[in-house]
Amino acid sequence: MNRLSDLVYPATVRAQQAVDSKRAFFPLAGQLAASALGLDASEVTEALLERERLGSTAFGRGMAIPHARIAGLSGVRGLFIQLAKPVDFDAVDALPVDLAFVLLSPVDAGADHLKALAQVSRFLRDEAAVARLRGARSAEALYAILTGDEARDAA
């Protein structure tokens, strides 16, 4: 299975986050980027909203990959947010989103940004992994699933 340990860190993973709308999700992601990565929360929020205005980043089955390019970022970074209750995200299949992998890339990331998007997309197509993500109730459990540390943690 594909591992995401080069994109997420324990500090960039959140479980059971409460938001009541798609619009409320983006400031939450901005705050997480600020606290975990030292980025400007409003800049991240606005960049994600700007991308979302082009079309929903929800791709179905209750998942979304909001993404944006951020000036001053040293490499591609990911935030994983599990929502306590699914919210309408204007997905193609109309299912509300409860799992979001936010991808933040440097402005000049080019191929690295596309490779990271493909990597996250491949991971989220794994139905068994997605079922484990939905069943997880802590950020630590989510991080273990995302990075493939489950087997080690179970030992």
Image (cartoon, helix red, strand yellow):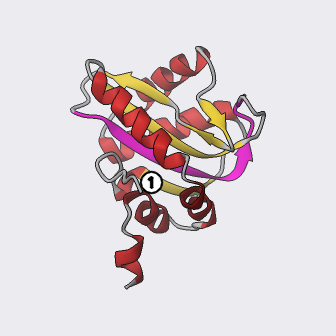
Can you give x and y, in whole percent of width and height, for residue 90 in the image? 72, 28
Provide the residue span drawn in magenta: 75-91
Judged by its main secondary structure, the magenta piece is strand
Residue most extreme to the left: 74
Q: Residue furthest right?
A: 94
In the rendered image, residue 89, in percent from the top left (x then y), is placed at: 69, 33
- Camera-side residue of 118 and 49: 118
Point 57% across, 64% down: residue: 132
Q: Residues within 10 Å of mark 1 (few under 14, many from 20)?
A: many
Left or right? Give the position of 138 relative to 92.
left
The residue that label 1 is drawn on is: 13
Res 141 visible: yes
Amino acid residing under circle 1 = Val
Expressed as whole percent of the image width and height from the top left, the position of residue 69 reads: 37, 22
Q: How many tags in the picture?
A: 1
Judge whether 99 appears above or below 75 on screen. Answer: below
* In the image, residue 139 above or below residue 87: below
Quadrant that contains the C terminus: bottom left
Q: Secondary structure at mark 1?
A: strand
Residue 32 is at least partly visible in this image: no
Residue drawn at x 45%, y 42% is: 120
